Amino acid sequence: QQYGTKKCFLRKSDGGRASLAHWTSGVKACVPPALPPAAVALRAGTCEGLKKCDAGKGDECPNVVAAANTWIFAINHMKRAFRGRVDADTWNHIERIGKESENFLNQLTSPYRPSDKDFPRVVYNNRLIFSHLEDALASQPQVTFSSEDASLPNPLRFGSLCGNISCYEL
């Protein structure tokens, strides 16, 4: 716990490890295994929280920042899953939706904010590419995600959106 918030720090090495009151420390080898990027992309891109945003901002999807963060999280994992495995046109589409999602998120805090029409367009393009590649994602190694696993980000753990800053915000 740090400043009243429970946190988990994953260090690059066991160097500097010490015993302190109210801290739990484990060896580097205790980190959870890496998750297959296709499984992460598929779960995040099809999670219920994100599907509620397919119609745009509204009662079902009040937080477009969280939705954009979730799309970026899913797209980044899709890139990892398909890097070097798809044709150039498909890769360009994946790159484009990633860039459009990042631009949308960055523009939300700029002096010239996107209009209400921009979010549905970004979501439509993202959903189009994910729907087109869903079978290819599903054909790669998959894992089961558990809501009991605190090491998982929200889209994988709960099927909900990422937060405004991180996909681990509760």
Image (spheres, helix red, strand yellow):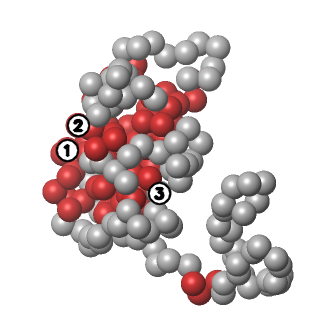
The residue at the point 37 percent across, 14 percent down is 117
Q: Quadrant of residue 23?
A: bottom right
Marked residue nearer the N-terminal end (3 or 2)? 2
Question: As rendered, which of 49 and 102 lies closer to the eye?
Answer: 49
Q: List the residue tagged with mark 3.
A: 153
Q: Within 10 Å of the Cα at label 3, are there few (<14), some (14-19), or many (20+) other Cα atoms?
A: many
For residue 131, which numbered disc appears in the image? 1
Indicate left or right for 91 with 167 as reference: left
Q: Residue 111: image x %, image y %? A: 64, 14
- Give, as a three-letter code, the residue at label 2: Leu
The residue at the point 50 percent across, 67 percent down is 151
User: How far separated are the C-alphas under marks 2 and 1?
Assistant: 5 Å
- Give, as a three-letter code, the residue at label 1: Ser
Q: Within 10 Å of the Cα at label 2, are there few (<14), some (14-19), or many (20+) other Cα atoms?
A: few
Q: Residue 157: image x %, image y %? A: 39, 59
Q: Secondary structure at mark 3?
A: loop
User: How far separated are the C-alphas under marks 3 and 2?
Assistant: 24 Å
In the image, which is nearer the foreground, mark 3 or mark 2? 3
| Visible residue check, residue 78 | no
Question: Are the two marked residues, 3 and 2, in contact with CB atoms closer than 8 angstroms?
Answer: no
Question: Are the two marked residues, 2 and 1, in contact with CB atoms closer than 8 angstroms?
Answer: yes
Q: Secondary structure at mark 2?
A: helix
Q: List the residue tagged with mark 2.
A: 128
- Give, as a three-letter code, the residue at label 3: Pro
User: How far separated are the C-alphas under marks 1 and 3?
Assistant: 22 Å
